[in-house]
Amino acid sequence: MPQVNYETKIQNAVKKSANIDLNEPEVYIKGQLPKQIVDDHVPYDKTFSEAFLYRFTNLLNGKIYVGRHKGQPYDGYMFSSKDKDFKKDFMNPNSEWKYEVLQYGSYEYVGATENTLLINANAKDNDNYYNKSNGGSNIVLPRIKLLQSIVNDIRENKSYKGAEMMLTSVKNLPDNAVQVREFTLDKDHVNTLRDIINDKRSLEHLTVIILKDRTYCGMTGDLIIDGNHSIAGAIASETGDEGIIPTLQIPKHLHEDLTDMEVDLLATMLNPRDQNPTLPTDLPTIAKHVCAMRLQGLDSNGKEIQEYKDNFHLSKKQKTKVSNLANEMYAKVVPNTSTWINYSVGEEGRKIKEQIKNEHITNDNKTGIFSKCYSTAKYGSQNDLYEMMIWNRDNPHNKITTYKIRWYHKDEEYKKIWKDKWQNNNEFMIDKLLKNHGIKRDWTYLKPTRSKLTTKKS
């Protein structure tokens, strides 16, 4: 006999007490798809994003249509294509389609992902696509996978697409260099490299990466993107300043399509956080570039930022630190003068707990109120409904008459999610479940924010 978990038992008991069929579907159920969609893949979106990117694939001829939608899957929307061939093929009752959700995120971020995908396929001129344009976006997504492939090529082969490592005199290296770290040079690392050079009496274990004839930040010239510490160590050593150093000079046609941001990211990715003679990119620098991507409109949970952070082999603790540092940097650029009140702690929390103590059924139920305070980010009705039903069963002459909740929001995102996705449906279900038990719902919303600024009382 299959086991039923405790939460399911409570849910079934509550339904039974309200005369609801145990097989009745929940409020949130998978929507009905047209019969010609014979295969679908729609991953769960735990963040309840604003929009999503989707793809239809005609399984009979392999043609594809890609689009985006502001909303959630199964909200009744299918597509907005005006292409006659697509609509004709889709409406064919004998057709077979696969429907997939490829990406969740903000509408602008999803649009940028759509634009990148369509450009890579040149969908507007591609007979395998129904799309008649490659879309458009104000956001330029950094191509993390491309940058990683460049790094791997350079590290594994000491070359890149025909550009080979060559020996260059330290004195003849260009003056321009990308400084993507929070500091210019780390003295301890320079000294470490200096000592190794003095022992080896050679620079062959080092590398310098140069982008030839690169226009960067409005200036054009040969640009060093990796090897600044190696150069400084060579100059500081006893004889290295007269030596020659392995140098990979990448010609213009191999890097001219990289954006300045991608050059910055590439420079940091050439210094991964693992054991090697180069100085690993520090956490504040990683956070700075995460913040820069966010300021351009990328989602903090988007795959580009996650892939960028994964490149540095960060632990969970280090990822948290990077996120916190990036949030602090972001807040300085996009300031917020208020803070969201957490009513589970502090002076506000103590006042609410005192009010609940005077109302709740634990005080011999003199008020007839089942009183609670919850964050909209964390709410499960089952336990409350279970307790109220059991109380009224065991206390027929002293029943609960009011289900009272004081709500507060964790932040603007949770407030929006609650209002758009959960509030009306939760109210509907609770009212339906409590109707036959003579219990009314009394839900109020506490003041959400207060000023970050505090004034000392005289």
Image (cartoon, grey):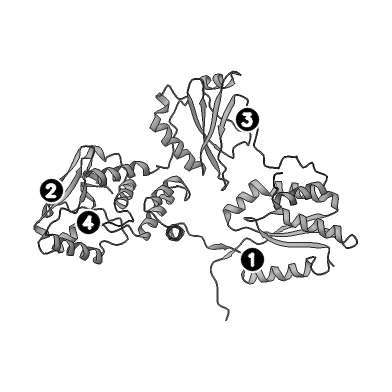
Farthest-out residue, right: 397
Between the C-alphas of marks 4 and 3, the distance is 57 Å
* Image location (x, y in percent) of residue 261: 34, 48
* Image location (x, y in percent) of residue 243: 10, 56
Between the C-alphas of marks 4 and 1, the distance is 51 Å
For residue 364, which numbered disc appears in the image? none
Q: Earlier in the sequence, mark 2 or mark 4?
A: 2
Q: Viewer-nearest of labels 2 and 1?
A: 2
Q: Label 4's element?
A: helix
Q: Which residue is mark 3?
A: 33
Q: Earlier in the sequence, mark 4 or mark 1?
A: 4
Left or right placement of residue 82 versus residue 284 in this view: right
Q: Which residue is mark 2?
A: 167
Between the C-alphas of marks 2 and 1, the distance is 64 Å
Q: Are marks 2 and 4 in contact (CB under 8 Å)?
A: no
Please, what is the three-letter code of the amino acid marked with disc 1? Answer: Ser
Q: Are marks 2 and 1 in contact (CB under 8 Å)?
A: no
Q: Viewer-nearest of labels 2 and 4?
A: 2
Q: Earlier in the sequence, mark 2 or mark 1?
A: 2
Q: Earlier in the sequence, mark 3 or mark 2?
A: 3
For residue 344, which numbered disc appears in the image? 1
Left or right placement of residue 148 versus residue 198 in this view: right
Tell me the residue at 79%/49% (across/down): 433
Q: Are marks 3 and 2 in contact (CB under 8 Å)?
A: no
For residue 228, which numbered disc appears in the image? 4
Between the C-alphas of marks 3 and 2, the distance is 63 Å
In this rendering, the answer to whether 62 lies above or below 193 is above
The residue carrying pointer 3 sits among few (fewer than 14), some (14 to 19) or many (20 or more) residues within 10 Å by Cα, namely: some
Quarter of the image for residue 388 reads bottom right
